[in-house]
Image (tube, rainbow, N blue to C red):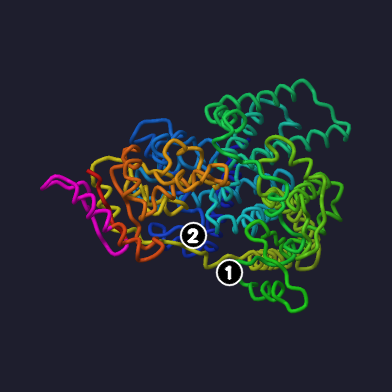
Amino acid sequence: MPYKAAEKTIAEHALAFFLYLLVFTFTTYPLILRFSSAMPGNGGDEYLMSWFFYEFYHSVFVLHRWPYYTHMIFYPRGVPLYLTTSMPVNSLLASGIYFFTRDRFAAYNGIFLLSSVLNGYFAFLLSKDVLKGYIPSFFGGLIFAFSPLIIEQARWGDLNVWSAYGIPLYILFFNRMFEEPGLKNALLASLGLFLATFAGFYEYTAMLLLYSLFFLIYRFFEGRRFGKNYLKSLAAMVLSFLAVSSPLILPAFYYLFINKGTVNLNPGVLQSGAYSSSIASLFIPPFYKHLLLGFTKALYFNKFYPLIYRGANSEDFLGYVPLGLFLGGAIKGFKEMKFYFYCFILFLVLSLSPIVHIVNGIFFFDPFVYLVNLLPILRDVRESGRYMIVGFLFFGVISAFGMKLLLEAASKLKYGVLLKSTAVLIIFALTIAGYDSYGFEMKSYPVPHGLYILKNAPPGPVLEIPAPWGGFDMFLQGVYEKPVLGGYAVGYGFPDRYKGYPPADFHARGFSAGAFADANSVFLNRLSLPENLRENLKYIKKLNVKYLLILKNRLGNSKDVKYIRAFIDYENSRSPKGAKRVSVLYDGRNTTVLRLN
């Protein structure tokens, strides 16, 4: 490539990257003003995602250990993290930010903003490869990166779902590899799959495997044949991915298929249906705070036929302007766009299934996705509505093609340049208005002062009272930096950690493990109830607990505080004169820290 052409290409790519950065700086406002004090989200899982970054950094750079089996939670046995939302790629990048800033908020927000821009930029590259047009391709990238479904996932703190940039990168080079077999495209496709899996989640791996299968079947029925060079490239892609990923994939398969008692990621069909999209959501603006929220509420809460808002996996609003361009691109250019149109339909159907909801009370059974649910790996997309994330990518490509046709028609008219410029501004403004998330939710909970006292205390395991459950509990551990009994690594209850250490009164009260869907939750919660502290002290000491972290603002009632005070007085009354069996390190309004001597 001549020097000037290469310079122009670099400038075009840099401009696209910068413009996406500007768009997301605006649409995630006030993130840019609170970069070191809050995280974007509504209080869902963003604090848990931040804990994964902390755990990776602490394991690798402080303890110098492999970060995917941790004893920092579910102490003393620990728990594997291979099948959790640990995001090793993002964790490594966040560790770099944290190393220089020592700021966990900045580390999280830096990855959040970087993922936002890469979502748009890599989708732009895919669109440009298909359309050969700059402005429409930028628009296609914007639809994918700015789609309400991805924004809603970010609002729930699911940074792994937000980090979808490996999807368009993989599809771009997987497609290219068919037309231009070779090691370069094979390795870049492998990189896309790696980023989709380890910056995102295994759900994306399943989606891309499904896409790959559909691509190959489609080309076969087109009459295309797979030559030796292509098969070699395909093998190089798969083998390079497996070679680089094997330290993470092999243990994941072990815990998924061999040691099945540890985690369970396979939902039933009806559970998947609860997390599906609905057809109505394709045409109703998103439910989060945005310019058209009043219109959305009027549709949901009308007196004639109220609709049910189905949560984070039903924010599938296509946008009225992009939908018009999509229809134009699909109809006028069906010959060029039919493969991407079929891809869109495939992932749309998957997102609606296995029970396709039209509106409240109107649904039908879809056997196609029931069959998909029976297949290994593909069934692990436990929230079927997320298939629409890939659907939005193809929707964006076709909408961008429709925009290209519109701009080409406008440029042929009188005052073509003016009409073309005006059309671009109107399309972008109305699309952003339809997807808008300006005034992005930010959360910042105060950290109790007692945790900093605990941080500076000598090493030792911690029992939180009440038992830790939820993302913010995990975030707090990153403050006091000590191992904790229990924890929250995946949203499926406590793994099989505590059967050997039931509370003293557990069997005496006639409970049995089979009587509970999650017996370990019962074990740990009984162990950490304030009224059980005295009688369960021998079990607590058997677990080598050194500290009791009592979050008083989370206790059930005022009696709990009295139980704790009685526990302290009783244990110290039994100690030799001048010694204390329980020391109060800190006693504040919301937090008490006790040390067991």
Name the residue: 46% across, 61% down: 31
Mark 1 residue element: loop
From the image, tell me which residue sits under label 1: 289
Q: Which circle, 1 or 2, is nearer the viewer?
A: 2
Question: Can you give x and y, in whole percent of width and height, for residue 133 in the image?
Answer: 71, 50
Question: Can you give x and y, in whole percent of width and height, for residue 312 in the image?
Answer: 62, 58
Residue 480 within the magenta-colored segment of the rendering: no
Residue 587 within the magenta-colored segment of the rendering: yes
Residue type at mark 1: give it: Lys
Q: Which mark is residue 43?
A: 2
The magenta region covers 565-590
Report whether residue 411 is seen: no
294 and 168: which one is in front? 294
Q: Earlier in the sequence, mark 1 or mark 2?
A: 2
Contact between marks 1 and 2 (CB within 8 A): the answer is no
Residue type at mark 2: give it: Gly
Q: Which mark is residue 218?
A: none
Total marks in image: 2
334 and 345: which one is in front? 345
Kindly indicate the quadrant of the structure image that contains residue 411: bottom right
Task: Name the quadrant of the C terminus.
Answer: top left
Name the residue: 72% across, 56% down: 277
259 and 272: which one is in front? 259
